[in-house]
Image: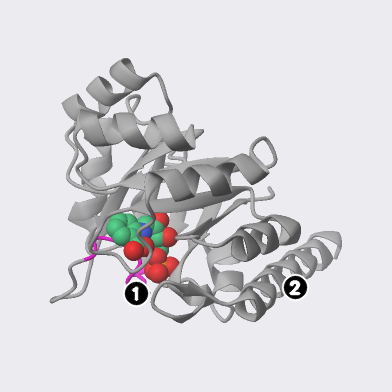
């Protein structure tokens, strides 16, 4: 299966264009003021308008209220809302009912117990995103460049569809693709030269690593 590729935390037309040229199927805009990747809804809307229809546009929010969601949706017209905070199952249902958009619920994973939290959202969230728990001292629930132990994922039921996130980079993406059942991968700081600064060369190297992993998989399959 060809996984979805999400490049998150984009802020410039150059980075958006390069992500799509190289094969991103999702791009994410971060609406969280403490993040170096934060972008104003109006600016994200302009970037989204350049590429609408060529890629799924994800609005990433953290425990946002309806007023904030309304503003983001009005400017950006995202395809999906990524809820990266402590949104309860009831809040997920409420957001879907009010705004009529698919929801990707993010979970912070460190232990097997963290994975059990998905159960309460089964059938409510349209997709799951499994990210690493923030390291102590970080104010960011995502974009920390750290991975969780992917071996934990073997405990998930076969049918659970998830996007894998957290600390992905050119060196470990091959292992993420071959060693997990993720239907998508998500990267942010692994293609940055500094917090919030996407590096086009690093993006190229990341996509090259994906292409290499896919071709190795294809060779294995034929043998
Ligand atoms: O990236 C952020 O700054 C961020 C801030 C607040 C909530 C979510 C955030 N990122 C969400 C993402 O989807 C990131 O791509 C994901 O956490 C992976 O980040 P990284 O480990 O840096 O690849």
Tell me which colouring the rendered structure shows: one colour
Is 173 above or below relative to 81?
Answer: below
Is 109 above or below relative to 136?
Answer: above
Residue 175: give its label. Answer: none
Q: Position of residue 33 (x, y in %)?
A: 25, 58
Q: Is residue 183 visible?
A: no
Q: Position of residue 73 (x, y in %)?
A: 40, 32
Task: Indicate yes or no whether the magenta region holds residue 146.
Answer: yes
Inter-mark Cα distance, 1 to 2: 23 Å
Main secondary structure along the magenta-highlighted residues: loop
Q: Quadrant of residue 17?
A: bottom right
Task: Indicate yes or no whether the magenta region holds residue 145.
Answer: yes
> Viewed as shown, does residue 8 lie left or right of 36?
right
Between circles 1 and 2, the one closer to the viewer is 1
Q: Position of residue 138 (x, y in %)?
A: 19, 73
Name the residue at 23% across, 65% down. 140
Name the residue at 19% across, 34% down. 65
Q: Quadrant of residue 103?
A: top left
First of labels 1, 2 by sequence position: 1
The magenta segment: 140-149
Residue under pointer 1 = 146
Q: What crowding class fits label 2: few (fewer than 14 Cα within 10 Å), some (14-19), or many (20 or more)?
A: few
């Amino acid at each position: 299966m060809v996984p979805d590729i999400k490049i998150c935390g984009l802020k410039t037309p150059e980075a958006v264009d390069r992500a799509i040229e190289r094969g991103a199927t999702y791009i994410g805009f971060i609406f969280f003021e403490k993040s170096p990747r934060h972008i104003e809804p109006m600016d994200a809307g302009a970037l989204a308008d350049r590429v609408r229809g060529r890629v799924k546009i994800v609005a990433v929010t953290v425990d946002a209220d309806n007023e904030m969601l309304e503003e983001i949706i009005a400017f950006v017209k995202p395809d999906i809302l990524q809820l990266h905070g402590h949104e309860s199952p009831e809040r997920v249902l409420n957001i879907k009912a009010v705004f009529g958009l698919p929801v990707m619920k993010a979970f912070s994973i460190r232990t097997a117990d963290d994975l059990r939290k998905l159960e309460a959202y089964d059938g409510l969230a349209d997709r799951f995103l499994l990210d690493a728990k923030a390291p102590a001292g970080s104010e960011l629930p995502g974009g920390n460049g750290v991975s969780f132990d992917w071996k934990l994922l073997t405990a998930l039921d076969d049918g659970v569809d998830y996007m894998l996130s957290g600390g992905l980079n050119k060196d470990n993406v091959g292992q993420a693709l071959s060693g997990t059942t993720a239907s998508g991968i998500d990267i942010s700081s692994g293609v940055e030269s500094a917090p919030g600064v996407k590096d086009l060369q690093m993006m190229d190297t990341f996509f090259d690593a994906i292409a290499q992993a896919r071709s190795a998989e294809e060779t294995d399959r034929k043998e």
